[in-house]
Image (spheres, rainbow, N blue to C red):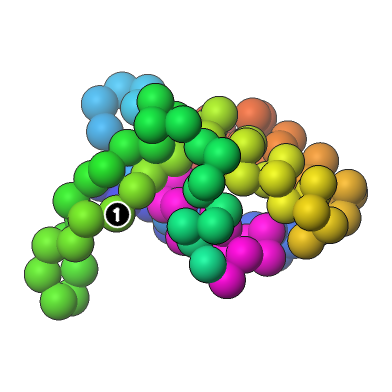
Amino acid sequence: MIKVIKNEKIGVIRVKVWGKNNFAFFDEDIAKAVGYKNTSVALRDVSFEDKILSQIKASSGKQNMYLLNTKGASIVIKKALKSKKISEEKAELFLNWLDEEIKGVI
């Protein structure tokens, strides 16, 4: 199942949910929310164990997309902060949202 979560300060993030407590974030949503135009640049520092290649149903058919676990999403956010794409305040808000609020929504 795919959930769409909206946060006025962060943006729209799609989350794939499966099983009881398994979820992962769409890589392009995380990258866009922190100011990356090129998702592959945002993911360069994310290890393979923190991203999942998944087939997602799209209007054009099945599409292969990377999903990020919480650690992978955190790496992208911290990279954006280091490169000054986002403010420290937004990075902290985003990281707290990943750790606390998202689990209540899923």
Secondary structure, mark 1, is strand
Q: Which residue is mark 1?
A: 65
Task: In the rendered view, tell whether residue 69 sits above or below residue 31.
Answer: above
Q: Position of residue 68 (x, y in %)?
A: 44, 40
- Check if residue 62 falls in the magenta segment: no
Residue type of the residue flagged with mark 1: Met
Residue 24 appears in the figure: no
Residue at x 49%, y 61% (from the top left corner): 39
Q: How many marks?
A: 1
Residue 106 percent across, percent down from the top left: 44, 36
The structure residue drawn at horizontal position 53% and vertical position 67%, both measured from the top left corner, is 38
Residue at (14%, 76%) from the top-left corner? Answer: 60
Circle 1 Cα neighbour tier, 10 Å, few/some/many (<14 / 14–19 / ≥20): some
Judge from the rendering whether residue 33 lies leftward or rightward of residue 92; answer left or right.
Answer: left
Q: Give residue 35's position: percent from left, percent from top.
A: 68, 65
Q: Is residue 71 visible?
A: yes
- Quarter of the view holding residue 31: bottom right
Q: Quadrant of residue 85?
A: bottom right
43 sits left or right of 64 in the view: right
Q: Residue at x 72, y 52 (%)?
A: 80
Q: Along the line of sight, which residue is nearer the eye, 104 or 21?
A: 21
Q: Is residue 91 above or below residue 100?
A: below
**On the image, which quarter does residue 20 sit in?**
top left
Closer to the camera in the image, 77 or 89: 77
Q: State yes or no: residue 34 in magenta.
A: yes
Q: What range is drawn magenta here?
A: 25-37
Query: Residue reaching furthest bottom?
Result: 60
